[in-house]
Amino acid sequence: MLLFGTPWGGLAASRDVAEEPRWMRLNITEAKISVESEGEFEQTQVKSDAAAISRDLVYVVPTMGLGVRGSVYHSNLFQYDLNAEGGVGWQEYRLDVPGQGAKTGLRDLQRYHAMVSLLKEKPFAVNFFADKERNTRDYDFFTRARVDSQRAGASAGYAEGPVPFRITAGQSEEHITGLANPMTYKDNTLNFTASNERRQGSHTDISYDLDQYHRQETGYYNQEGIYHSANLRDMETFGRDDWVNLRTTMLYTRLDQTNLPSSSFSASELVTLRHSQQLETTYNYDFNQRDTGPVENQGHNGIASIRHRLYESLVSTFDVHAQSFSSQSPDTKQDTTRYGLGLNESYTKKLGDWGRLNLGYSIRADQEDRETLGQFIIVVGEAHTLKDGELTFLHQTGIVRSSIRVTDPSGAIVYHELLDYLILPSGEQTEIQRVAGGKIPNGAAVMVDYTALRQPSDSYQVLANYLQLRLDLFNGLLGLYGRANFVDNFGGESLILQNIADRVAGADITWRWLKAGAEYEDFDSNLSPYHAQRLFQTLRFELTESSALTFDFSQRWLKHTDNGLGQNSYDFIGRYNWRLGTRVAFNAEGGMRITRGFGYDQDLATARTDFDFHFGKLDLRTGYEFQDDNFLGELRTRHYFFVRATRKF
């Protein structure tokens, strides 16, 4: 017997009464018709005197959608939730290059979501899923890509007993457009997770992930491989009031690919003893090993510290630490040992009703010994975070520029110079910088491999001091802050070592709709000295209860004092939001970024609007996006719009 047209919410509300078995329950949750249209117009001009290449795409597709939800025999036995939308319409594609013209044809459009649950109320439930949809992905404010994705898979597990576990297997595909180069990512994945919860504060979690991937990027070779990752985390507490805390982590990864296979293993043990509310000691040991191609790296790191809180305002931490690192390849070898002492003081004081003072000071004294063999050293898996407005230097000097290779943390995505990142020599050091408009998200972690000239064996001492202070006045109206970082090396005359005297001073003000600040940095170094100034302004106006206008501006000037080269950047971003109840919403945002310096000038401009209208069973959504990128003499302009009208029944 079939049951049609019953709202699912009504069925859910009746669950308080025992559900009677029924061979089939079928509830129509949604029925709709839609018309969708998109247009994309992109023009690229490599040189000012070269002919522009245009790519235009327009389509109009009417669709029909239906959503159903129900069960077979009983919802606890077999429950399903299906929502599908599809249609066929007109499409025109034009590529304006010699020998190419317009192509007119049919365009099919599909979206769907499907979920099937077996025995969902039992501890051994099984789920099947399938999805196809279109979303957006922001790499920074000026770079938004469209992601057409589809995935399918199943998950099963056991939710009771001492070790609940779950296994998920799936297949996914993403087609990314809107960047300079379209990309396609295909993945076959397997995931296993298990956990054991014991008494409060003690638990063990294990996981394993397998990803068989295929990466295809226009204009570059395909990347294929299999990535394995196994992780173990354990937390134990002992003693009265759980004053002993033990944390163990282990991680193993392996990347099987033809050009540069790699594997890594890391283990960490952290013991925390809370002797009292004021006194705490910690003991930490880390081990890591990474093999990439012919290169083998191994490291040990240990630290023991004692932390004491005097009243609520002063916290003191003293530590003893030691590190050892070795790297070897067929023709090179480097062994590094470092050990020393550290002290950190942190002080916070409320100054009546008018201010707050924060002070911090740390000092570190180390002995470092290096033993090297061969002409070059090979560095693999050097971790960095690339963020706009922050300088990032590779750790070694004398780097062979052509050897630099940048990937995501897994190694499965290889980034490309000029398209995704820049290499900027700076005296004895090498700076790496993300390219706005590339596929490295702002603030993302990357791994860098490279070859550098070997430095001779030697020993030296390091004394590092760091001081920071901040004074907030008049209930946060005005803030004054400063930082000073000094690193001095003694000995090691045969080595290229960096001595640093870095001083930063700044102020910020927060008043009603305005937040603004200024900062000056004097980075004095024997390898890469520079001066930097930064201004920022944020203005927010609450125009009405339902609308707001925001402006974010920032300016940065950087100059390397050893060679006179510099880089200046200016960001201007505005946003407007307006909402009228639940029926109407309008958003608009736009901005510009102007970057000058190092021979890598770039001009970026972006504008976006979207409008949503809901009335009864009618939904209308439309939007427009403009992107303009002028970089290295290549001018890329892109217009995109979409309109979607939906009538529900």
Image (tube, grey):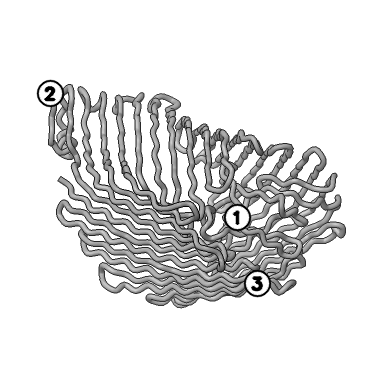
For marks 3 and 2, the one nearer the N-term is 2
Disc 3 marks which amino acid? Gly
**Mark 2 residue crowding within 10 angstroms, few (<14) / some (14–19) / many (20+):** few
Disc 2 marks which amino acid? Met
Q: Is residue 163 above or below residue 508?
A: above
Query: In x, y percent, where is residue 23?
Result: 17, 22
Residue ID for mark 2 = 1
Query: In x, y percent, where is residue 479?
Result: 51, 74
Tell me the SS state at disc 2. Answer: loop
Query: In x, y percent, where is residue 159?
Result: 38, 28
Q: Is residue 247 above or below residue 568?
A: above
Q: CA distance from mark 1 to mark 3?
A: 45 Å
Q: Is residue 580 left or right of residue 500?
A: left
Residue drawn 35% across the image and 40% down it:
132
Q: Find residue 546 and name its label.
A: none
Residue drawn 31% across the image and 72% down it:
542
Q: Extreme front residue here? A: 99
Tell me the SS state at disc 1. Answer: strand
Front position among marks 1 and 2: 2
Which quadrant holds the C terminus?
top left
| Residue 161 picture quarter | top left
Residue ID for mark 3 = 566
Residue ID for mark 1 = 308
For marks 1 and 3, the one nearer the N-term is 1
Q: Is residue 158 left or right of residue 631?
A: left
